[in-house]
Image: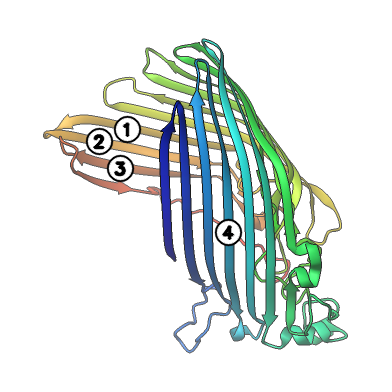
Amino acid sequence: VTNRSLQANVTWAIGELDFTSITAYTGVERLQQEDADMNPFLGSGQDLSFIAPTFAADTDTISQEFRVAGEMERLRWLAGAYYFDNEVNGNYTLNTDAIGFVRMDARYTQQTDSIDLFGQVEYDLADRLTLIAGLRWTSEDKELDFRNVDSSGITAFCSTEPDPQAGGCFNPAPTPLSPYRPTPDTMILFNTSTVGGVAEQDDSYVTGRLQLNWSVTDDLLLYGSYSRGKKSAGFNNGFLDTTQVFGNNPIESIPFDSETLDAYEVGLKSTVLSDTTRLNASLFYYDYQDFQTFQWLILNQVIFNADAEVYGGELEIETRPIDGLTLQLGVGAMDATAKDIPTVTGDTVRDREMVGAPELSVSALARYEWPAFGGTLGVQGWGSFQDEIWYDIQNHPISSEDGYTVVNFRGSYTAGDGAWEVYAFVNYAFEEEYKVYTFDFSSLF
């Protein structure tokens, strides 16, 4: 990966107003080559991985933000505008010569332009009561130009064979030629010339936030908030295929809609026990419309939209009961449900747990420091527990990970002037093993 970036920040005062300009350019070149199957035969007469994908992309981003802020006796405000221009040129290849399967070359360009206008005010309704309100208007245009070709001859054969499965192919029927599939070896040609407006995403929307803070005492803050957020619409990418030889990507499934989140939260932030302990707690409810989730269709990961809801609570405690001792505890409980998820075959829908959303999570830390040898010695232990999670929205047993606990230890010595530190640590002290991700190809293989 090669990164290059330039940024210019300018701030100045105009009377009692503070003006800020942020101009930025970022360029990223990325090349990732995988031995996806990790077979043990490479170097022993086997020259190729059975499944060898390569992912390359060149991304250029330009952004410009202008902000102006001011304040009066009870009012603090901010307003601004933001421009974003992003272009991605990518190339994916997949070589499966070692198992006599497809050899794909996918190339694409995605262009995104976005303009935002935003503002926020904080107004003190009373000495201990503050209202926060913000709005943001966004207009975004996105366009995809994508082409994927298989040079192995397998797609051309399987997509034109009258009875593909009799010829040993995956696809159940031949795929006719069309503007978005002009030749037998073309898996897809997706742009405004071949599919029209399906290759464009044009969206304008308003998001915002409303929050009320009540400082009951100097040591207790109560708050309640509502906010609406959006995740942009987009396009499925990767090794797209309309022939069902490798993937199952009908033209209408390539774009996916924007995601809307209405979030409600109430909570408290407090200091108790003679200022030795910080206690924070919150309850929340998230209502998603068109939540962006994903599933595997043949060998492609495909994003699609479904409604979802999440509710739960969090508790954080940090205390320093005696000099040098710090104790921390965090507990989170959550119920996260995606609604009406279709089966892979599309014959029924049912509710499913959201990906990566444990019902219970706990974290804890204990650290003790004391002066020694002209500096400070410290010992620390910390760990976390995570309940069962799913790595696929279908909640198939093969995509689950049981709950697990990770524990770490650390000891250190810090010089008296803080100029240097020596430390030793043991992470994953009890050698806990757990899955970090799964790909569910069980229905295919």
Mark 4 → mark 3, Cα distance in angstroms: 43 Å
Q: Is residue 351 above or below residue 242?
A: above
Q: Secondary structure at mark 3?
A: strand
Q: Residues within 10 Å of mark 2 (few under 14, many from 20)?
A: some
Task: Residue at 52% x, 45% y: name it.
Answer: 65
Q: Please tell me whether mark 2 or mark 4 is closer to you in this view.
A: 4
Q: Secondary structure at mark 1?
A: strand
The quadrant of the rendering that contains the C terminus is bottom right
Q: Which residue is mark 1?
A: 367
Q: Which is nearer the N-term, disc 4 or disc 3?
A: 4
Q: Which is nearer the N-term, disc 4 or disc 1?
A: 4
Tell me: 211 left or right of 325.
Answer: right
The disc labelled 2 sits on which kind of residue? Gly
Q: Secondary structure at mark 2?
A: strand
Q: Which residue is mark 2?
A: 378
Q: Quadrant of residue 377?
A: top left
Label 1 close to label 2 by CB (< 8 Å): yes
One can see residue 265 in this view? no
Q: Which is nearer the N-term, disc 1 or disc 3?
A: 1
Q: Which is nearer the N-term, disc 3 or disc 2?
A: 2
Q: Which residue is mark 4?
A: 86
The disc labelled 3 sits on which kind of residue? Arg
Q: Which is nearer the N-term, disc 2 or disc 4?
A: 4
